[in-house]
Each structure stands twice: as C-alpha cells, then as structure tokens.
Amino acid sequence: MIEQFLIQYYQQFTDIEVSLHLLTRKEIWDRLENNKIDLAIMYLPDDSIKNWKPYKSKKIAEESLVFLSHNPSLKKRKKIHFKDTLDQKWVTYPDEYYLHQFINEAYKNQMVDRPVSAAQFTSPFELLRFAEATDLSTALPTSFFEAHNLGVTAHAVQFDPAIQFELAFVFRKEKEAIPRIDNFFREFDQYLAEKDYLTRIKEQNRQII
C-alpha cells in the first residue's frame, strides 16, 4: 500500500525524490538518531527505545496477528486460544525480530508455553511459502495475509485474546515543521480518507505461492 501511495504521490509532485529502504530496527533507530532518514515505518510499541522525547509517531493502521494452520478443525473457526496453537511446530521470524519477540511476550502474558520453531525466515513471504509447503503453523500480520492469501490452503483464525499492535510513521519532532514532510502527511491522510488501509490492502490481493 505504501508503494502504491508513493507512486501516486510522485505523480503529483515530480520535483521530490523518493527513497525507500528495508532496514533492521537497529538501523532504523540509528538513521533516525543521525538524521539520515526523514520517516520510519515500523510496528509499535517498541520497548527497546527508552528515550522517546525526541520522537513522535503517526499511526497508519491498527494491526493484529492471524494464526495460520492446516488443521482441518480450524476451517470454520474465527478465533483460537493460545494453548490450542501448540499442537505442531511453527515457522517463525528470527529470535531478534520484533514480531517474534512480540509473539513470545503475548504467550508469556497468557502463561502459555511459547511456540516451538522448526524454521526461521526474515520475510513474511518466506514464512507463508514454507508453512504452505511443510504444513507447519505460523503467525503473520493480518494485512499481509489479506494482501497475499490467494491460493493459500492454510486456515486463518484470529488469536483469542487478539495480538494487536500498530503500524506507524516514526520521526524526529522537528521534522513536522519541514514543508515537504507536512505536505507528505497531508497527502497521505487524504489517501487513506478516500479508502482505508485494509480496503486498499485487500484490493491488491495477489498470489505469492
């Protein structure tokens, strides 16, 4: 969805330069701290940063995780308790990744053993492909699944209670006063006012398997 917005934005404002990078969280924070990027797009909350005073965030969308399994008993279910997701191994993000740590914390808070990982990948595309090929379970952001579920045979159900977080822009406070950033945010708000985040995601649904 961000890519589609940037295409539209550039077509309106061809004098700007767009540079989009895929970074680790450490790289994101280092570049924000050193003023090497204007905006970061990341999941929140982030407890790894203790001093939020120089920064602000702007919500893009509410997010949640969806549980994927090939267990046929889930075909007609909409929700699943944490303890019922442990009957088989998972394919997960690496240990140091935000969503892996976020999932483990959610299981800890429910006083349930954390999932056992049989394989780890950094990309949700890889997680989904591997889970489909091996019948392992996994958990992915709902928006990603809504955008890439064509041809997927796994059953998708929400966690009960839900595992929720936020997708947001993060930036240094002084950036708001810069005209190009102010204009970017105004155009982005208008973009989502016309169609919300999840609607745009669903419209882009495509097969990746």
Image (cartoon, helix red, strand yellow):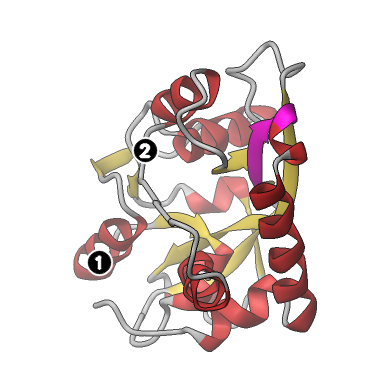
| 147 sits left or right of 21 in the view | right
Q: State the SS at label 1.
A: helix
**Residue type (three-letter) at the residue carrying disc 2:** Leu
Q: Residues within 10 Å of mark 1 (few under 14, many from 20)?
A: few
Tell me which residue sits at (47%, 54%) in the image.
139
Q: Is residue 76 left or right of residue 59?
A: left
Mark seen at residue 23: 2
Q: How many labels, in total? A: 2
Q: Residue at x 48, y 84 (%)?
A: 204
Displayed quadrant of residue 97: top left
Q: Name the residue rendered at 71%, 67% in the picture.
A: 187
Name the N-terminal-most of marks 2 and 1.
Answer: 2
Can the viewer see residue 59 in this picture?
Answer: yes
In the picture, the quarter occupied by the C terminus is bottom left
Measured from the top left, where is residue 21 in percent x and y?
36, 46
Residue 88 drawn at (x, y percent): 36, 51
Per the image, label 2 sits on a secondary structure element best described as: loop
Residue 185, compared with residue 77, is above or below; it is: above
Disc 1 designates what residue?
129
Q: Amino acid at mark 1?
A: Arg
Picture quadrant of residue 83: top right
Residue 172 inside the magenta-drawn segment: yes
Q: Nearer the viewer, residue 208 or 179?
A: 179
Q: CA distance from mark 2 to mark 1?
A: 22 Å
Circle number at residue 208: none
Which span of residues is magenta-colored?
168-174
Q: For label 2, count other residues whose C-alpha is less than 10 Å away and answer few (under 14), some (14-19) or many (20+).
A: few
